[in-house]
Amino acid sequence: MSKKYNPYDEILTTLEQAAKKLGLKEDDYIQLKYPERELQVSVPVRMDDGSIKVFEGYRVQHSGARGPYKGGIRYHQNVDMDEIKALAVMMSLKCAVVDIPYGGGKGGVTVDATKLSNAELERLTRSFATRLFPIIGPHTDIPAPDVNTNGEVMAWFMDAYSTLSGYLTPGVVTGKPAQVGGSLGRRDATGRGIMLMTREIAKQVGLELKGARVAVQGAGNVGGTAAKFLKQAGCKVVALSDVSGGLYSDTGLDIEDIVTFLRARRGRTLAEYEGTNFERITNEELLSTEVDILIPAALENAITAETAPGIRTKIVVEAANGPTNSDGDRILEEKGVIVVPDILANAGGVIVSYFEWIQNLQYLKWDEEEINKKLENLMVKAFNDVWNTAEKAGTSLRMGAYMVAVDRIATASKLRGMA
Ligand code: GLU
């Protein structure tokens, strides 16, 4: 029987390889192998029918070496401690690779959010925020949206925290609606970043973005927005999917119309989208569609030993966290597919979270143009850091990104005297 797949162990393996390539001693990075704090909580919720249900919730604070813990909160039926630990270490690496002054954390509740009413979702969020209250705060640990959480959820979360602390505390979470301290540009930031990183990698490998064929797996805030920006950049988005399946059009999908349809109501899926200009495909078919650029923007483990052999693309830009496991990665490398790794590619969200937090702490507001420009500057700089490191070391971009990140975290620990 094959060993149970553990995402945390997989990341540690890559992290150790990066540390070795950097010539670090184990003492320099051993702390990174252990999250600083792991909290498991019960999340009791009064349901609409009057009964009480208790869900499991988690918050992992991985590394605080470079700043407060930072990372999203996801609501999903598959959430467990191993997954949240893996996502937390990814946040430490992500914040380091784009050089923003944060450590990494992640949280989640094991719940199928699509089965909850809006009122239940709000009570769940308030209950979870109350449980996390002792360990979070604008200078300690700052959550944000992730899978199945959004601005509305962040507003409830902030309100619950503020009620407990006795004053309005917008800086405790990011990704809020603009009317309650959210930043302009935050909702689109991850998708915009995906477009920027696709543009940079295309430039490096000499691929013309105009007319390039793109497939996007995942049509949520990240996938849908990335598809929209890539189309605006001249790409032909031929395939898009969500949990219900996918759509394919050889001449390119009407992304604006599809995304507008999906966002009109929480829980809407592509299966409900009507039209004639496309054919329906499965998620497996989406992954093996012949394209120039493939964007996995759904959950972990999309590209594996099973799916990687069928993939026909030149470039993968990882919009999801951990969409490629180590088997998948090896197969893509053998096939000569270039992978822009998650910790770089999808960092746009946390970068604009950082801008939101700065605005909150200083009670000021930046305009959207300024935010988008600052986002682009940070991401292009990070791309070049990763590209140059990978070139110099003769490694993949994933290894290059891990090297940049591990080096920054280990250096911070050392300077603080922690190592
Ligand atoms: N959930 C997003 C991520 O995985 C954003 C985190 C944040 O803004 O703190 O990067």
Image: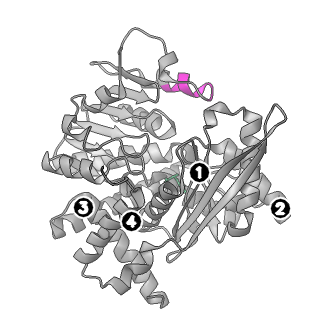
Q: Nearer the viewer, residue 162 or 33?
A: 33
Please, is residue 338 above or below residue 360 in the view?
A: above
**Residue 300: horizontal and vertical position, in percent?**
41, 46
Q: Which residues are magenta?
A: 259-266
**Residue 131: horizontal and vertical position, in percent?**
73, 59
Whether tag 2 and tag 4 are in contact, CB under 8 A, the answer is no
Please, is residue 170 above or below residue 317 in the view?
A: below
- Dot 4 or dot 1, earlier in sequence: 4
Residue at the spot of label 3: 387
Q: Is residue 383 left or right of residue 89?
A: left
- Helix, strand or loop under label 1: loop
Residue sitting farthest toward the top = 276
Quadrant containing the C terminus is bottom left
Residue at the spot of label 4: 97
Q: Is residue 361 left or right of residue 145?
A: right
Q: Give the CA separation, mark 3 to mark 1.
A: 30 Å
Going by the numbered disc 2, the residue's amino acid type is Leu
Please report the residue visible at 54 percent of the width from the left and 25 percent of the height from the top. Answer: 262
